[in-house]
Image: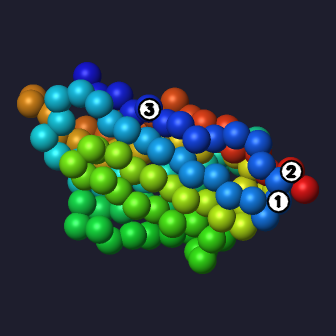
Amino acid sequence: QVQLVESGGGLVQAGGSLRLSCAASGIIFSINAMGWYRQAPGKQRELVADITSGGSTNYADSVKGRFTISRDSAKNTVYLQMNSLKPEDTAVYYCNAKGVITGIRRGDYWGQGTQVTVSS
């Protein structure tokens, strides 16, 4: 069974920084892409950033220049460095892993979510 465990959320003032981490555990042969999504109250879940196994990255326009996604493929871990945080970044942040190949299947997985709150 594959599990994604997130850490690093919390409360920060506007202009501050946080670093999120997400580690995938289980019998994993490879992961195609890992990323972060977020969901604010009353809004749909949206992509924040993702990174492929080849290192290609994709960012939401609202976070470009402020957030940086990185990945340690050997550890099946993805990071999200968030700088210059704004109150509108407040949301539950979810880790996602796509194209996870285990011994018997290929699938997508989600973490449980970590709260990020930015105060003004």
Report the residue at 76% width, 42% height from top: 11
> Would you place residue 72 above or below residue 67 in this image?
above
Q: Amino acid at mark 2?
A: Ser
Q: Give the class, few, some or many, for how many residues have Cα within 10 Å of label 1's Cα (few <14, many ≥20).
A: some
The answer to whether any part of residue 40 appears in the image is no
Q: Quadrant of the N terminus?
A: top left
Q: Amino acid at mark 3?
A: Val
Q: Earlier in the sequence, mark 2 or mark 3?
A: 3
Report the residue at 30% width, 53% height from top: 72
Helix, strand or loop under label 2:
strand
Q: Which residue is mark 2?
A: 119
Q: Which residue is mark 3?
A: 5
Q: In the figure, is residue 36 to the left or right of 89?
A: left
Q: Earlier in the sequence, mark 3 or mark 1?
A: 3
Q: Give the class, few, some or many, for how many residues have Cα within 10 Å of label 2's Cα (few <14, many ≥20).
A: some
The one of 33 and 13 positioned closer to us in this rendering? 13
Q: Are marks 3 and 1 in contact (CB under 8 Å)?
A: no
Q: Position of residue 31 (x, y in %)?
A: 23, 48
Report the residue at 54% width, 47% height from top: 20
Q: Which residue is mark 1?
A: 14
Report the residue at 23% width, 67% height from top: 54
